[in-house]
Image (cartoon, coloured by chain):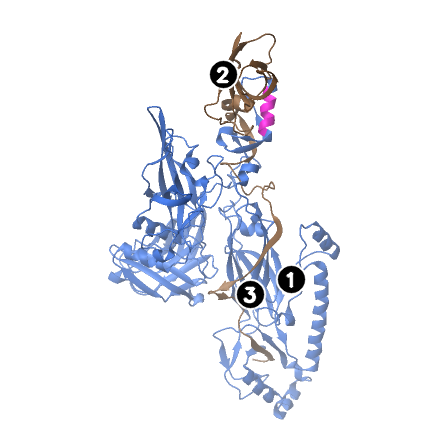
């Protein structure tokens, strides 16, 4: 699960809670979704950076430099005060919610665990993205206690067990939802389950172990099911004794690809003397998808009904280890998958991708014009504004204005409403021109531009196939005060990494930051994909309040102009569509489905009346669930290789039939068969 | 020349490379050529009281080939067996060693991101709406406020 705290590409966290026995550590910096890097201060050993899975880490003059996935990153860290010593056994987990993070670490004999809100604190002092954690900390004396604390605090992930499709033609991609565990027995995952859901009619013949392993080679450990980085493997052994062939299978369960947590006893799945066992593989999980484990169910039949004869279960420890893993952020990475990840040998060289550059965000403009004394931008309350009105229309004030200006309006430049109120503003006594009122504590700002976090959302895959991409799947985003905009679902589903290669797995985090000019109401929305700026749209917000007849006439003229823009926008297919009316019609005709206008020109005064919450609209195709479609149509491959590396129904685009001693008539017949489809 | 013909009951699809057969039903017949015989499409006449109506496959080791068989009753106890070579099963080992560009397959080497129209989609679309969240709540720009811009400072 991608980390997304504050939508910042670099995350700095300061733990302000002291650690016992003099151990302390200060600042971490980490790329989103990656392990953290930390800087420790030691009064005795000097500044010592440490890292988790990063390389070439160094610290000098308040700057951490490190490398991650081939890129070099730097981050400023201002030196803290006090004495700090080395904590060299840090383990950290950043969890993927917007406002929560969890970190755990251990010293030589004590385990610590933080769970807390993340609070942005004084960003100017350390650069944006510096956070202070004010949450509680707990310490534990055993790793077991720590693990329980972690697993009890995490949200449930979504995961799917899928059978490995490389086996026989009897076994394709399907969910192995065969049995369930009574959720009340699971509790927090620290106790093993003891009961079955009574419904075993979901057991499918395809999960008969003999069927699943029929094409396996003897003594060769082969993956038969997976979930993310979790794998279930089978190893077959065949014996021939007294003319009786017996097939045995041993199952092993790995998580994080290579950590073996479960080995089944050797199961007899076939015997030529007729004593065929009916062992079924099942992935057992609870109703919230919090816990899952492989198990073997041996069925017996009596009076036409199924019952449980025997089944095997992992131990409590194995279950808890698995549970912890499932809560970690590795579930959705799927670093090993049956999908092509861009390693085909045609159409360019995928081994030499073109690295891309970060699109760096600009700092806030500093020349605002509000700190020169020429004009002042007040943010009065309603009551203060009423007092200001009384003050402005007093005879004394009007007389004074006449000394300096021909028009009263020359002094009152604008009055408007914005749906935004900066925090931490200074106050002063209201004055206009050289006229000082008695209205005190009126907020004003000398800062004209502000960055506002407008939230984020994790866009996930649905079908895990080409159906998750355009033109089948579409995505639009509604930006308050800016309108509805179409986004490229292809890039959101599978953005290129900074090294130019495509990311593994589908989906990304979409986040939005508004930069607002409070003097004019102009907004620039920056849409980021996994923290990288990918879209920028502009608009305007604010409702003007007429001060004089002149400003009222100007405002009405502005509304008329905006209305004319609305008509034009509808005709051209949307606020952002850079098309002529004729081109928009052509585009509609060419689309598989008509484009629907969900919203018109939302900007300026009208924008104040529209929805103020950003949201995305995702349109996805609906694919019917077809049982074993691969048996009837095959699934797309477009890969080359010897045919013994393929299995099941295989249809060739082209084939070289060579090395076979046959007649030419037979050779041509073989080509025809292979092009029409052969079950290998 | 003496030749041995094994008739079998094939249970598999014709395009399956490794075919399965009804167990315990194979019939073996031996005879001699009377004239020319096609290797790829041989035709045999068998006189037997056996019921051959359900047999559909033949193997001739002398020809090193396997055949789809079509059996016709041509007289009392007389059957005509027309064979057509099953190249897929006959040359299975050699075929598996051939190199190919595979368009579709069932087992490994699947690329679900390759769009060849494999998956069917309904006219019904799934349209969902999701708000952007900040701190677990719907994100908003902020609260309303008056702004008054005046001359002087």
**Chain depicted in blue:** A
Mark number, residue A515: 3
The picture places residue A165, in percent across and down from the top left corner, at 48, 39
Chain to which the residue tagged by mark 2 belongs: B
| Circle 2 SS class | strand
The picture places residue A182, in percent across and down from the top left corner, at 37, 55
Label 3 and label 2: CA atoms lie apart by: 87 Å
Q: Give the foreground label among 1 and 2.
A: 2
Q: Give the foreground label among 3 and 1.
A: 1
- Asked if labels 2 and 1 touch by Cβ distance under 8 angstroms, the answer is no
Residue with the mark numbered 1:
A598
Residue with the mark numbered 2:
B28
Chain to which the residue tagged by mark 1 belongs: A
Local packing at callout 3 (Cα closer than 10 Å; few below 14, some 14-19, many 20+) is: some
Out of A53 and A610, give the one closest to the viewer.
A610
Q: Give the foreground label among 3 and 2.
A: 2
The picture places residue A171, in percent across and down from the top left corner, at 47, 38
Label 1 and label 2: CA atoms lie apart by: 75 Å
Mark number, residue A132: none
**Chain depicted in brown:** B
Give the residues in magenta: A666-674
């Amino acid at each position: 699960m991608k980390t997304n705290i504050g939508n910042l590409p670099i995350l700095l966290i300061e733990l302000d809670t002291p650690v016992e026995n003099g151990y302390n550590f200060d600042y971490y910096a980490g790329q989103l979704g990656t392990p953290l890097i930390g800087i420790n201060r030691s009064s005795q050993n000097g500044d010592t950076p440490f890292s988790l899975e990063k390389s070439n880490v160094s610290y000098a003059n308040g700057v951490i430099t490190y490398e991650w996935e081939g890129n070099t990153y730097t981050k400023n860290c201002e030196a803290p005060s006090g004495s700090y010593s080395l904590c060299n056994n840090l383990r950290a987990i950043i969890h993927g919610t917007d406002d929560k993070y969890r970190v755990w670490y251990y010293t030589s004999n004590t385990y610590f665990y933080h769970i807390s809100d993340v609070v942005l604190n004084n960003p100017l002092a350390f650069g944006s993205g510096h956070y202070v954690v004010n949450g509680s900390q707990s310490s534990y004396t055993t790793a077991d206690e720590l693990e329980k604390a972690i697993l009890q605090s995490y949200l449930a992930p979504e995961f799917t067990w899928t059978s490995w499709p490389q086996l026989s033609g009897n076994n394709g991609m399907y969910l192995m939802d065969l049995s369930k565990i009574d959720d009340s027995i699971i509790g927090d995952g620290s106790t093993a389950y003891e009961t079955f859901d009574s419904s075993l009619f979901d057991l499918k013949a395809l999960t008969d172990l003999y069927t699943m392993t029929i094409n396996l080679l003897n003594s060769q450990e082969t993956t038969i099911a997976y979930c993310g980085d979790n794998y279930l493997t089978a190893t077959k052994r065949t014996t021939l004794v007294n003319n009786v062939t017996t097939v045995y299978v041993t199952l092993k369960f790995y998580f994080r690809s290579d950590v073996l947590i479960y080995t089944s006893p050797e199961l007899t799945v076939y015997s030529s003397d007729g004593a065929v066992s009916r062992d079924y593989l099942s992935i057992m999980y609870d109703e919230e998808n919090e816990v899952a484990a492989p198990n073997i169910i041996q069925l017996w039949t009596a009076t036409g009904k199924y019952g449980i004869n025997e089944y095997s279960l992992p131990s409590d420890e194995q279950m808890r280890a698995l549970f912890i893993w499932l809560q970690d952020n590795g579930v959705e990475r799927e670093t090993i998958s049956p999908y092509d990840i861009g390693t085909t040998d045609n159409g360019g060289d995928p081994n030499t991708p073109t690295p891309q550059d970060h699109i760096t965000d600009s700092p806030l403009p500093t020349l605002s014009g509000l700190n020169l004394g020429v004009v002042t931008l007040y943010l009065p309350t309603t009551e203060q504004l009423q007092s200001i009105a009384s003050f402005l229309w007093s005879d004394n004030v009007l007389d004074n204005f006449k000394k300096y200006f021909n028009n009263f309006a020359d002094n009152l430049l604008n009055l408007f409403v914005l749906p935004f109120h900066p925090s931490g503003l200074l106050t002063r006594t209201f004055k206009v021109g050289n006229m000082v009122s008695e209205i005190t504590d009126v907020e004003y700002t000398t800062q004209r531009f502000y960055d506002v976090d407008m939230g984020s959302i994790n866009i996930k895959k649905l079908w895990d196939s080409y159906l998750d991409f355009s033109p089948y799947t579409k995505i639009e985003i509604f930006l308050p005060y800016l309108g509805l905009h179409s986004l490229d679902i292809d890039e959101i589903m599978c953005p290129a990494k900074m090294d130019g290669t495509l990311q593994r797995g589908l989906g990304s985090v979409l986040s939005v930051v508004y930069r607002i000019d409070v003097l004019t109401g102009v907004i620039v929305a920056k849409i980021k994909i996994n923290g990288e700026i990918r879209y920028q749209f502009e608009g305007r917000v604010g409702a003007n309040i007429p001060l004089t007849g002149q400003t009222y006439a100007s405002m009405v003229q502005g509304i008329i102009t905006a209305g004319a823009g609305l008509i034009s926008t509808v005709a051209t297919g949307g606020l952002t569509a850079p098309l002529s009316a004729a081109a928009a019609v052509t585009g509609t005709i060419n689309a598989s489905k008509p484009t629907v206008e969900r919203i018109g020109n939302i900007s300026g005064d009208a924008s104040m009346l529209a929805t103020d919450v950003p949201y995305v609209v995702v349109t996805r195709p609906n694919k019917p669930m077809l049982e074993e479609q691969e048996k009837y149509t095959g699934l797309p491959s477009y890969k080359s290789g010897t045919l013994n590396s393929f299995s099941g129904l295989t249809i060739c685009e082209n084939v070289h039939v060579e090395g076979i001693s046959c007649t030419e008539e037979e050779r041509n017949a073989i080509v025809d068969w292979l092009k029409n489809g052969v079950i290998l | 020349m003496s030749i041995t013909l094994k008739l079998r009951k094939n249970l598999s699809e014709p395009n399956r490379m490794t075919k399965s057969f009804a167990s315990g039903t194979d019939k073996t017949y031996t005879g001699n050529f009377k004239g020319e015989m096609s290797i790829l499409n041989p035709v045999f006449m068998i006189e037997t009281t056996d019921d051959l109506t359900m047999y559909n496959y033949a193997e001739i080791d002398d020809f090193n080939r396997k055949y789809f068989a079509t059996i016709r009753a041509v007289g009392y106890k007389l059957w005509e067996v027309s064979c057509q070579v099953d190249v897929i099963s006959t040359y299975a080992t050699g075929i598996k060693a051939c190199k190919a560009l595979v368009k579709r397959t069932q087992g490994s080497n699947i690329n679900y991101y390759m769009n060849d129209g494999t998956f069917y989609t309904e006219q019904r679309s799934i349209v969902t709406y999701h708000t952007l969240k900040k701190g677990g709540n719907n994100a908003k720009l902020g609260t309303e406020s008056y702004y008054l811009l005046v001359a002087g400072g």
